[in-house]
Image (tube, rainbow, N blue to C red):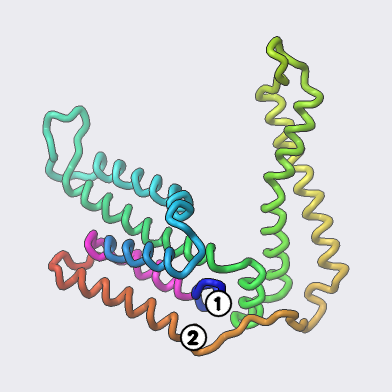
Amino acid sequence: MSPALERRNPTVKLAVLFACSLATLFILNPLTLGLLTVLAIIAVLTTTRLTPGRLLTASVPFVAFGVGLVMVNALSRPGSEILEGLPVRVTSEGLAIGFALALRTTVIGMLSIAFIASTPPRDLMTSLTQHARLSPRFAYALLAGFRLLQLLPSEWQSIRAAQAVRAPLGRDGTPRTGITAFGAAAFSLLVVSIRSGERIAQALESRGLGAGPRTVWRPVALDARDAALTIVVLCAFALAATLGIAAGTGLSLV
């Protein structure tokens, strides 16, 4: 049986993600953001197929960006120094703000990971066409572009393998490929991508994309359980913010 979040409407999940991310931008309370981060991690692990290891791998870009925010704010914001003997000036105000911004990034990142892990691209485009009135011309074009991006790694490996076959061998018997070969491979990948995009566009046009009203082969359901998901997530978000206010640290607008 598929996880609970995978069975919910993609358009509703996208709207909830946008609303929570927008509300998070107005919160600069470490306690509230920390509580939201914990709730988001629990939600991802219990409602999607992601394991703790895969979740940790997926969150690396957000964590790295958060570390950068902490460092930049701690070193650049004015305020009282933590230790005067350090070779660089680190302020407590900058460290607090940087930590809060890092937690904000983590919250939005966890919610985004949950959405991506629980939403098949086809269902997302179908739902946006059905319930958000997105034009099929844009929906199918986006879906075709996403498929093309998925094929780029295998195309890159094929190009590099072909270069290795033709490249001269070094003394150790391995192919000698340098910066020039890397640039040639990148240019070849660009050419392959353009040609693939042109073929996809011709295929979509030949099938009458955008020629008139279209039916949906496998429609995506929208029912009361999607409304329940919206209510539960927004109430949990509001409760976490309320607990942060009650703790005395408050909310700040940035």
Residue 215 location (% of width, % of height): 76, 83
Q: Is residue 61 above or below residue 232?
A: above
Residue 6 location (% of width, % of height): 54, 72
Disc 1 secondary structure class: helix
- Measuring 12% from the left and 43% from the top, which residue is drawn there? 80
**Which sits in the foreground, 88 or 170?**
170
- Measuring 85% from the left and 61% from the top, which residue is drawn there? 202
- Measuring 29% from the left and 76% from the top, which residue is drawn there? 238
Residue 164 location (% of width, % of height): 75, 26
Looking at the image, which residue sits at the far front? 1
Is residue 254 among the parts visible in the rendering?
Answer: no
Residue 20: in magenta span: yes
- Measuring 15% from the left and 73% from the top, which residue is drawn there? 246
Q: Quadrant of residue 247?
A: bottom left
Q: Is residue 223 above or below residue 66?
A: below
What are the residue bounds of the magenta stretch?
15-32
Q: Mark 1 — residue? A: 7
Q: Mark 2 — residue? A: 225
* Amino acid identity at mark 2: Arg
**Which sits in the foreground, 152 or 51?**
51
- Mark 2 or mark 1, which is nearer the start of the sequence? 1
Residue 3: in magenta span: no
Disc 2 secondary structure class: helix
* Amino acid identity at mark 1: Arg
Q: Quadrant of residue 77?
A: top left
User: In the rendered structure, are the residues bearing label 1 and label 2 in contact, judged by CB atoms less than 8 Å apart?
Assistant: yes
